[in-house]
Image (cartoon, rainbow, N blue to C red):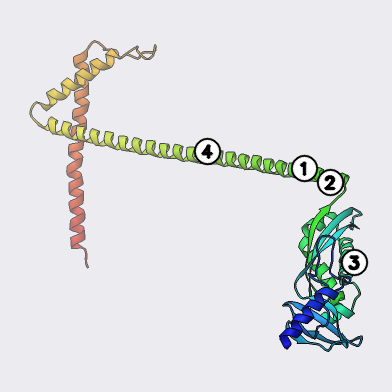
Amino acid sequence: MLRTLCRTGGALLQQTQRTVPRLWVTPAQQRWASSLPMNTVVLFVPQQEAWVVERMGRFHRILEPGLNFLIPLLDRIRYVQSLKEIVIDVPEQSAVSLDNVTLQIDGVLYLRILDPFKASYGVEDPEYAVTQLAQTTMRSELGKLTLDKVFRERESLNSNIVHAINQASDDWGIRCLRYEIKDIHVPPRVKESMQMQVEAERKKRATVLESEGTREAAINVAEGHKQAQILASEGEKAELINQAVGEAQAVLAKAEAKAKAIRLLSEALTEQNGNAAASLSVAEQYVSAFSKLAKESNTILLPSNTGDISGMVTQAMTIYGTLAKTTTKAAPEAVEENSEELVNQSTSPQ
């Protein structure tokens, strides 16, 4: 019996179904998939839909998805609300920014019905109301910003519009989820000035970068010269130190060589025929000195007996002998003085 009644109700619904004004309709798409259903006693409500039922012209209840029963003639399905997320295309509108620039802006609005009762009886045309509210809020928010901030603060602008719409749409049972700005169109002259501003800004940054590069290059060159001078001075210092050390070592080597030569000469003089060897060496040096006369200067001082070589050698040997005797006498005296000091130290009282 129930199955027959359902079939009869479905056939009657298809034959007597009438078209009613749809709330959620735009030129691009339709919000609803069907018109208002008739009361067939047994009704099946689709998922994510809410059917508002009136009994004798007064709100009675909201049918939930699934199987539902109604009283014929008394109950009537008045509204069908979709609980899915609804997308509304906000038409393009003109707005004036804080710096008096006229902009053409459009957007997309995302809604969802939270309370089917308020959405049905709170406002006559929810789509029109929300669209107008979004447009007026957009113009109000754009009037608070300059043209440069409109592009930079796009995200904050969207959030402010959503907040303003939710404050007004609470009584309609509608919740605004998101609002996204699609396009922002500026006048051609303003666009040209913005382009010139961008080019000037890029030229400015290029000039600044070039000047910074020149400064860095000059600093690097100066640092290079500084390091070169420091290294050159350190090299010169090391060279002078090495030269001084070399000269000192040369002086020490010459002194040691001369001392060794003198030591060998003294040992040779103490041997047999040492005086004859010394006389021969003095005679050779005398002849060598006369051979160098008048080679480095025109002024020459000559002794009175330049031709008496034997006399010169004899005189040199006499001087040498006198010095040797003096040194020999001085040595015993120094030994006696040292022995006396030792005796005095030993005999002094402790």
Q: Amino acid at mark 4?
A: Gln
Q: Quadrant of the C terminus?
A: bottom left
The disc label shown at residue 132, or none = 3
Which residue lies at the image location 20% right of the left edge and 16% below the top edge? 311
Residue type highlighted by circle 2: Lys
Measured from the top left, where is residue 228 in percent x and y? 51, 38
Q: Residue at x 86, y 63 (%)?
A: 138
Which of pointers 4 and 3 lies earlier in the amino acid sequence? 3
In the shown orientation, is residue 154 left or right of residue 321?
Answer: right
Identify the amino acid type marked 3.
Answer: Gln
Amino acid type at image mark 1: Glu
Task: Rate crowding at label 2 as few (under 14), some (14 to 19) or many (20 or more) other CA atoms within 10 Å.
Answer: few
Badge 2 vs badge 3, beta-carbon distance below 8 Å: no
Residue under circle 2?
191
Q: How far apart are labels 2 and 1 at the CA level?
A: 12 Å
Left or right placement of residue 326 versus residue 138 in this view: left
